[in-house]
């Protein structure tokens, strides 16, 4: 920068400081008060009113005062008053930040250390030289991110294939192949399917995370060696001069060195209004230029950009930790402690108790029996059932115009008891409407004049669209001159022939002589979250984009965000289903509170502004308020984490980059299809029609899936508990002198697994079920599976113990005892299925009858070498025992199930 320009900037800064001096004195006096006392917010507001020119400034002060009073009532946070003044426009509009808190904000640490870089100060009209650019590239200070946050494809395959149980099942399969027992290998099909699903889910998540980019602009204009050139965004280097203009997305954080731009930072902050950036102001990667042009020096690159810090945190993918996943992992980890020692002991017992047969046959029988025990202990079918039920749920949910990006999120959505919503896009649709028109001076026909006024500019912003819907275009009045709206001017104006000039904009900028009654009305509406526009008139004509003369109020237009018609009914559904609603918005908490109240959110008046709060202080008040305003992305994430730490299951909706951290922190995140691609990339669910009203049906589908998985999983866990108990029973029997061996090979349990467990569980998983989810998954499943496991163990024990002690006849064979046991087990399994299906309806009745017929036919039709049993070996006495044991299981199953239900309800 030339010496002359530096002096001009310095002079401008001094002027700003002089203009702000009176307000600084007020705030300085307040700041001098005792540190340990909380200042009276009402006194602060009165002093600001007395020293303020801007009504917006007073409104912001009021908002902060009310927020301070709420926080002070909590007695958890000590407040101080400080000054923070920002020059925002030619009118020197000041925005004050009145309250700051003692603890420092948590800062996301960048991956690249720029403190070691030699910083250049390039001429804003020349840019970096070739030598400087080469040095930057050599040192690695480019905009290309080199950090990987996801696993490689190879690592995903290794992690999913080489698991403990996959290795165990593989060893068992190899052993069975070595002894020629090929018919016992069916269990490997389930293992392969489970492994395939795990790999598929992780690869899909990796692809999604790798595609996540907040800055999507492929090229950027830069100034180098005095020449403008277009380069790929990744080739930007530290201290480059970027040339930005309207429509550009900013690729790197930087400081404005020349010119002026207005940027939309809604993707980063949630604040939808454009922000003016003058010389010396910082611009952030990911935001968009909506007006003006500027030369910007790059301050951060790659992972050090603010948007990249959000992006990189979002890319740190971890497997979902739903209660269902935790329960399955707990079962697997618990079984892993017993499966190896029990398997080793059982192999030895089966080998030495197999009688006087050839060595190969001894080994074969020992391997088959041990394999039957170990495979029975591993609930591989439960994983398959879970995946099947969840995928069926995904297909059903897709009919509700909803995309499921993470399988297990269906469960978490069904369990959500706190749902955090953003105002825009969920409760409102992003548009506005004219709520009320208050005519002050009826000299002019307001609708007629407004129709001509709006037809001149034909703007397409949301405010103009709302006015256009309220007032029809016409061309009755001829235009002499006009002043378009600008963010610095805060109004627009048109001079019409014969009737003078009309102005439309912010009340304090349109008219200086608003009476107290009208001022009170405006303040009242603004405090309730409405946007107020003043329509004024003067007889003077526009000259050189300036208006002289007195402007008189003609009418005020009261606008508000358009609430989705379905929002109140949707909020009511969540209220009725004990789901707590919290509103987290980057906008004014007053506005968000009023809109939430209009939608029926409980305790919507309980709001607070988080402006200036540290992460720790946000955490302290997370469960004390319903509406949170002025929330930063880090604060949103802190709120979600704090609620989760209080044992809440938290859902989060979002549509912008500012929501990403919170969405990643939540148990279930929901994005709108109309939102940012980055938000959709990290979301578990995406609502394709951006319609919040579809959420209740999606939640109901989640409940159906989880309730049915919980019901059906008890069948699989029943077999696991039964197998472990039978193995321990065999070991203990041998300690007391019995020569009992484990009776079943893997194929012997096929009828039980298919017709009493596998097929019924898959069919039951598809049944409608809108009941709320109660209790914990693991406890419910264990209590439901225990009666069945006990019943199966009793049936097998009563079948085999008499035979081992010569009750039937001395010549009875092991094959006969095995056949008796399997038939008894199947009858018991069908009795358990009957209890599980109660109360019976047509669907479940057909299921039970069909399974009974199929199981019976399988016993009598399937060949012996396929299922390992032969019913022709049984005599009349043995058939009588089968009938007694089998059919007595029906009332016994009912009694055990009744006890289990009482335990679950306690």
Image (spheres, helix red, strand yellow):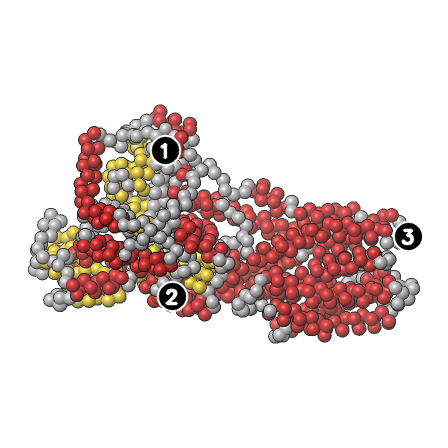
Q: Residue 189, percent across and down? A: 68, 53
Out of 99 and 691, give the one closest to the viewer: 99
Front: mark 2 or 3: 2
In the picture of the structure, the residue carrying the numbered disc 3 is 356
Q: Residue 557, percent across and down? A: 22, 63
- Residue at horizontal 60 percent and vertical 70 percent from the top: 905
Q: Which label is found at residue 411?
A: none
Residue extending farthest right? 810
The crowding category of the residue bearing disc 3, from other C-alpha atoms within 10 Å (few below 14, some 14 to 19, many at least 20), is few
In the picture of the structure, the residue carrying the numbered disc 1 is 238
Quote the CA–CA distance across marks 1 and 2: 49 Å
Callout 3: SS: loop
Do the numbered discs 1 and 2 sit on residues whose CB atoms are within 8 Å?
no
Quote the CA–CA distance across marks 2 and 3: 80 Å
Q: Residue 701, percent across and down? A: 52, 64
- Residue at horizontal 13 percent and vertical 68 percent from the top: 442
Q: Which label is found at residue 603?
A: 2
The crowding category of the residue bearing disc 1, from other C-alpha atoms within 10 Å (few below 14, some 14 to 19, many at least 20), is many
**In terms of image quadrants, where is residue 307?**
top left
Q: Quadrant of the N terminus?
A: top left
Callout 1: SS: loop
Quote the CA–CA distance across marks 3 and 1: 83 Å
Q: Is residue 528 above or below residue 121?
A: below
The crowding category of the residue bearing disc 2, from other C-alpha atoms within 10 Å (few below 14, some 14 to 19, many at least 20), is some
- Residue at horizontal 20 percent and vertical 42 percent from the top: 17
Callout 2: SS: loop
**In terms of image quadrants, where is residue 285?**
top left
Q: Quadrant of the C terminus?
A: bottom right
């Amino acid at each position: 920068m030339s010496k002359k320009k530096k002096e001009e900037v310095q002079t401008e800064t001094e002027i700003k400081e002089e203009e702000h001096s009176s307000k600084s004195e007020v705030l300085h006096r307040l700041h001098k008060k005792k540190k340990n006392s909380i200042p009276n917010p009402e006194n602060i507001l009165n002093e600001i009113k007395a020293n303020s020119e801007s009504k917006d400034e007073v409104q912001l002060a009021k908002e902060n005062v009310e927020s301070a009073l709420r926080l002070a009532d909590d007695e958890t946070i000590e407040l101080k008053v400080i000054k923070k003044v920002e020059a925002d426009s030619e009118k020197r509009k000041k925005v004050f930040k009145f309250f700051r808190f003692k603890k420092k904000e948590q800062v996301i640490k960048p991956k690249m250390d720029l403190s070691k870089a030699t910083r250049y100060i390039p001429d804003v009209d020349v840019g970096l030289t070739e030598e400087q650019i080469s040095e930057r590239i050599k040192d690695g200070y480019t905009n290309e991110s080199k950090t990987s946050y996801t696993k490689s494809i190879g690592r995903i395959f290794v992690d999913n294939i080489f698991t403990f149980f996959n290795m165990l099942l593989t060893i068992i399969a190899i052993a069975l192949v070595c002894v020629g027992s090929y018919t016992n290998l069916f269990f490997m099909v389930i293992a392969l399917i489970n492994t395939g699903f795990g790999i598929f889910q992780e690869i899909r998540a990796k692809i999604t995370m790798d595609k996540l980019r907040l800055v999507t602009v492929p090229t950027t204009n830069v100034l180098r060696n005095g020449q403008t050139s277009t380069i790929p965004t990744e080739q930007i280097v530290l201290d480059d001069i970027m040339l930005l203009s309207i429509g550009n997305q900013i690729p790197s954080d930087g400081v404005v060195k020349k010119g002026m731009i207005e940027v939309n930072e809604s993707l980063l902050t949630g604040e939808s209004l454009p922000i003016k950036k003058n010389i010396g102001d910082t611009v952030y990667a990911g935001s968009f230029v909506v007006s003006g042009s500027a030369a910007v020096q790059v301050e951060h690159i790659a992972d050090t950009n603010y948007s990249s810090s959000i992006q990189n945190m979002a890319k740190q993918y971890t497997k979902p930790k739903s209660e269902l996943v935790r329960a399955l992992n707990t079962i697997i980890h618990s079984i892993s402690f017993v499966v190896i020692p029990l398997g080793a002991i059982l192999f030895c017992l089966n080998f030495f108790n197999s009688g006087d047969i050839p060595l190969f046959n001894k080994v074969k029988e020992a391997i088959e029996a041990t394999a039957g025990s170990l495979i029975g202990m591993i609930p591989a079918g439960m994983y398959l059932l879970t995946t099947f039920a969840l995928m069926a749920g995904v297909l059903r949910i897709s009919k509700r115009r909803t995309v499921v990006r993470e399988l297990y999120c269906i469960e978490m959505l069904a369990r959500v008891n706190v749902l955090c919503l953003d105002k825009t896009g969920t409760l409102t649709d992003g548009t506005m409407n004219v709520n009320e028109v208050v005519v002050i001076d009826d000299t002019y026909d307001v609708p007629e004049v407004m129709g001509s006024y709006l037809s001149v500019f034909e703007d397409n912003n949301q405010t103009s669209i709302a006015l256009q819907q309220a007032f029809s275009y016409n061309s009755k009045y001829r235009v002499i001159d006009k002043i378009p709206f600008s963010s610095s001017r805060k109004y627009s104006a048109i001079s019409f022939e014969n009737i003078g000039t009309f102005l439309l904009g912010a009340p304090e900028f349109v008219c200086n002589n608003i009476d107290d009654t009208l001022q009170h009305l405006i303040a009242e509406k603004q405090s309730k979250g409405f946007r107020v526009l003043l329509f004024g008139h003067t007889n003077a004509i526009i000259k050189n984009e300036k208006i002289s003369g007195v402007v008189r109020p003609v009418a005020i237009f009261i606008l508000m965000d358009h609430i989705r018609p379905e929002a109140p009914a949707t909020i009511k559904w969540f209220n009725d289903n004990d789901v707590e609603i919290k509103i987290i918005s980057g906008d004014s908490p007053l506005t968000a509170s009023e809109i939430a109240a209009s939608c029926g959110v409980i305790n919507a008046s309980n709001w607070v502004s988080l402006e200036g709060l540290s992460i720790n202080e946000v955490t302290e008040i997370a469960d004390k308020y319903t509406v949170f305003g002025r929330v930063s992305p880090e604060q949103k994430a802190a709120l979600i984490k704090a609620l989760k730490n209080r044992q809440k299951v938290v859902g989060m909706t979002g549509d912008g980059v500012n929501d990403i951290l919170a969405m990643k922190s939540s148990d279930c995140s929901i994005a709108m299809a109309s939102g940012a691609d980055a938000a959709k990339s990290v979301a578990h669910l995406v609502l394709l029609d951006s319609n919040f009203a579809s959420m209740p049906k999606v939640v109901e589908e989640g409940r159906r899936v989880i309730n049915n998985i919980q019901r059906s999983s008890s069948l699989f866990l029943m077999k696991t508990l039964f197998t472990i108990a039978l193995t321990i029973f065999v070991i203990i029997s041998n300690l007391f002198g019995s020569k009992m061996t484990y009776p079943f090979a893997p194929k012997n349990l096929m009828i039980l697994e298919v017709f009493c467990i596998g097929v019924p569980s898959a069919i039951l998983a598809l049944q409608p079920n809108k009941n709320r989810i109660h209790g914990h998954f693991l406890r419910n499943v264990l209590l439901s599976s225990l009666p069945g496991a006990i019943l199966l163990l009793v049936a097998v024990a009563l079948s085999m113990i008499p035979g081992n002690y010569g009750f039937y006849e001395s010549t009875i064979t092991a094959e006969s005892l095995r056949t008796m046991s399997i038939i008894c087990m199947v009858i018991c399994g069908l009795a358990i299925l009957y209890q599980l299906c109660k109360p019976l309806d047509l669907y479940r009745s057909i299921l039970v009858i069909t399974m009974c017929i199929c199981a019976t036919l399988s016993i009598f039709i399937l060949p012996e070498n396929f299922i390992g049993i032969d019913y022709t070996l049984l005599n009349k006495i043995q058939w009588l025992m089968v009938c007694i044991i089998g059919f007595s299981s029906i009332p016994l199953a009912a009694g055990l199930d009744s006890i289990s239900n009482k335990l679950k309800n306690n």
